[in-house]
Amino acid sequence: MSTSILGYTYGQPQLAHSPITLQELELLKQALLFGDEDVRYLRMSHDVLQGRTEEILDVWYGFVASHPQLVYYFGKKQGGQPDGEYLAAVRKRFGQWILDTAAANYDQKWLDYQYEIGRRHHRTAKNVTDGVESADNISFRYIPALIYPITTTLKPFLAKGGHSADDVDKMHQAWVKSVLLQVILWSQPYVKDGDF
């Protein structure tokens, strides 16, 4: 894990404690059919993806850039133009997120950081980390919507590691489950108290 990325606070004591317990996380993983094999395949993907994060981010940022409704959330409040510094800062954390996902460490530190990521998408803490004047809240509908483009465009990169087609499929399925798990956790700030 990198500690030199601005705003990357994974494992730091100032993070709020997730309202979801580790026991509840385990139950959620069971509901997703996420098990030890998925952890193994995510970790297999780490070596495949480690040197390719910039290429992956080029694809993902290209996708976001081609959709004005997504670019909007990185625009300056005044004038609406994309904030290049904000996009660059988020990109560094996004690259680290790829590696954190592939590391597959589902402990309290990871759980607390998922809560923080959710808060950074929601009006609770959007713009605070980077001190920017941008949209106050990412509309919830776009968060689960991005599961498909993120995971689909990742599969060709997983295939570049020289693994069998079966291993590539299993790495991909583990990624789909992990991204879905994370998006569910990021959704918590959007859900009315008592309903999550």
Image: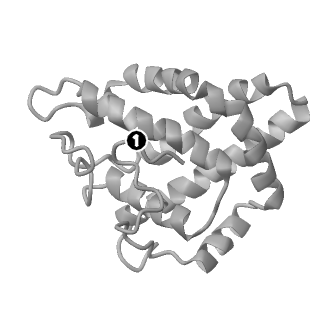
Packing grade of label 1 (10 A; few <14, some 14-19, many >=20) is few
Identify which residue is drawn at 82% across, 34% down. 168
Residue 170 percent coordinates (x, y): 82, 42
Residue 194 percent coordinates (x, y): 41, 80
Q: Is 134 on the left or on the right of 97, as rendered?
A: left
Identify which residue is drawn at 57% across, 29% down. 53
Q: How many marks?
A: 1
Q: Residue furthest front?
A: 4
Identify which residue is drawn at 46% across, 60% down. 113
Residue 60 percent coordinates (x, y): 50, 27
Identify which residue is drawn at 41% across, 54% down. 117
Q: Is 185 on the left or on the right of 64, as rendered?
A: right
Q: Is 59 on the left or on the right of 79, as rendered?
A: right
Give the secondary structure at mark 1.
loop
Residue 2, placed above or below residue 158: below
Q: How is the image coloured?
A: one colour
Specify the quadrant of the image occupied by residue 123: bottom left
The three-letter amino acid code for the residue at tag 1 is: Ile
Residue 87 percent coordinates (x, y): 32, 30
Q: Residue furthest left?
A: 78
In the image, 167 versus 4, the foreground residue is: 4
In the image, 72 versus 99, the foreground residue is: 99
Q: Which residue is mark 1?
A: 5
In the image, 146 versus 82, the foreground residue is: 82
Residue 100, placed above or below residue 45: below
